[in-house]
Image (tube, rainbow, N blue to C red):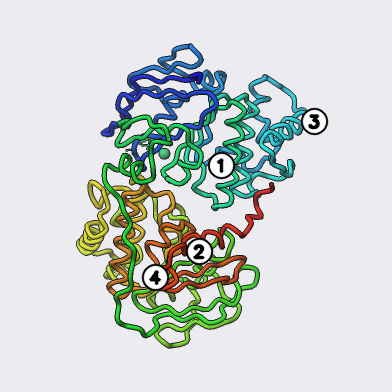
Amino acid sequence: MEPILCARNISKSFIGVRALNNIDITINAGEIHCLAGENGCGKSTLVKCISGVYTPDHGEVEISGEKYKNLTPIEAMNKGIQVIYQDLSLFQHMTVAENIAISKLKFEGNKTINWKKIKSIAKEQLNKIGVKMNLDETVGEISMANRQMVAICRALAQDAKILFMDEPTTALTKTEVDHLMKIMLELKKKGLAIVFISHKLDEVFTVADTITIFRNGDKIGDFNSKDLDEKSLSYHMTGREIEYPRYHRTCKDNSPILEIDHLTRKGQYEDISMTIRPGDIIGLTGLLGSGRTELAMSLFGLNPTQSGSIRINGKETSIASPMAAKKQGIALLPEDRFNQGLFIERKIKENISSALIDTICKKGLIRKAEEDTIAQKYVNELKVRTPSIETVVGTLSGGNQQKVVIGKWTATAPKVFIMDTPTVGIDIGSKSEIYEQIHKFADGGMAIIFISDEIQEIMANCNRVIVLANGKCIREFDENELGQDGADKIITDLIGSQSAEEVTP
Ligand SMILES: Nc1ncnc2c1ncn2[C@@H]1O[C@H](COP(=O)(O)OP(=O)(O)O)[C@@H](O)[C@H]1O
Ligand SMILES: [Mg+2]
């Protein structure tokens, strides 16, 4: 195999953090190369050093035989290096065609706009990956999965030789991920090198030829993916053996906390009923768009229901606002922790105390000592890795940010805690700590609605599972059924059989 890029002795530090420590890596044509490792281990920093965004403190990058110590982004692009970042960096207000063609035309030095050319470039690239899309649609209005396709086409239009994809699957459903992986495999066949960054083990194994594992800025090694399995990979990533213990309900109290009957909001979810007891961890699963998040929002007073009833502790109630939900002991960990779960620029302690602000205020002033005590308690309990409770939340890793959101709501002592995809984009280490914590909550009598489409975590954490599709409950599993061999496969098939309408084949 022919190496297109070699990076040697790459080191990079930020203030107080050694992000990369003497890294060597070789990327070959026609290969899918995964960079694997927990959040914060340096994967994105390495990509930025290789693509000219950062100048490394030491080391050099050799591309097609030419050596660079201070590679610029333009040089990297001219050499065929294309990076698709997590946010995709698309122009939201421009069309699909414009987004695909603009960089190519810019580089070619075009001074006037040639609409015909824009469209033909876009069409040609979309054909390459076998995707049909409305070229005139505004990118802000298409699905995440399709935006990803646009970003890939934009890279291809610029004659990408190496395509870096930094955690491309975080916002995609299972079906969309499968589609993306198929496209990656096709592109590889055409000779492209793809560097795929992920901390999701199943995805890594589906596509990777080579896996380079990082831990804390160090390279642990390069592996042929055939020589690793999930267990050894996660061991190398974390330095620990990780197993998720299965949850079993121990709570003896069988009187329902939350009962919902025939809850309906047309177009979102229909005729949903469930009874939740203390200590239940109910898995709510189904694709994005299956109605799971909309249902969660309704139970938290953010999305009025049209018909059906809700009872809390046997008493019929309506939940008209998040304030009302909180008063009745309902908490919601939202799907989008960055925008909805946290005040990202504020300190940990301010975030944790924010849901309790009415109880820790006296005469309009926050009792600082009490705020500190509460924050410190939940930082300790949830094992938030931070220098102090004064640290700004935005500087923490994803896993630690999520622990802060959990801490904030736990401080309100909820009876029902709805968690909408609580471990998306979170490293394996933090994940298992979060699971452990959720089990503790449930053992203590809290009821949890656990929304997820990651089958492993549903099997490990839930004693009951409800599968939603197009707003309807299509199947429910009790503890017995979940314990039977092959239950995970049945649930996966149920979810997978639902087509993701957003991706046009
Ligand atoms: N611009 C930056 N300023 C300061 N620290 C940074 C910056 N970018 C990354 N880091 C730190 O460098 C380490 C590696 O980060 P990153 O490369 O983003 O990890 P990964 O992509 O593997 O999750 C982390 O400790 C992170 O906090
Ligand atoms: Mg990263």
**Kind of residue at badge 1:** Met
Instruction: List the residue tagged with mark 2.
Output: 285
Q: Could you tell me if the residues under marks 4 and 2 are in contact, i.e. CB atoms within 8 Å?
A: no
Q: What's the distance in space between the residues labelled 1 and 3, CA to CA?
A: 31 Å
Q: Secondary structure at mark 3?
A: helix
Q: Could you tell me if the residues under marks 4 and 1 are in contact, i.e. CB atoms within 8 Å?
A: no
Mark 4 or mark 3: which is in front?
4
Which corner quadrant of the figure contains ligand 1? top left
Q: Earlier in the sequence, mark 4 or mark 1?
A: 1
Q: Quadrant of residue 501?
A: bottom right
Q: Earlier in the sequence, mark 4 or mark 2?
A: 2
Mark 1 or mark 3: which is in front?
1
Q: Which mark is residue 181?
A: 1
Instruction: List the residue tagged with mark 3.
Output: 116
**Kind of residue at badge 4:** Asn
Instruction: List the residue tagged with mark 4.
Output: 463
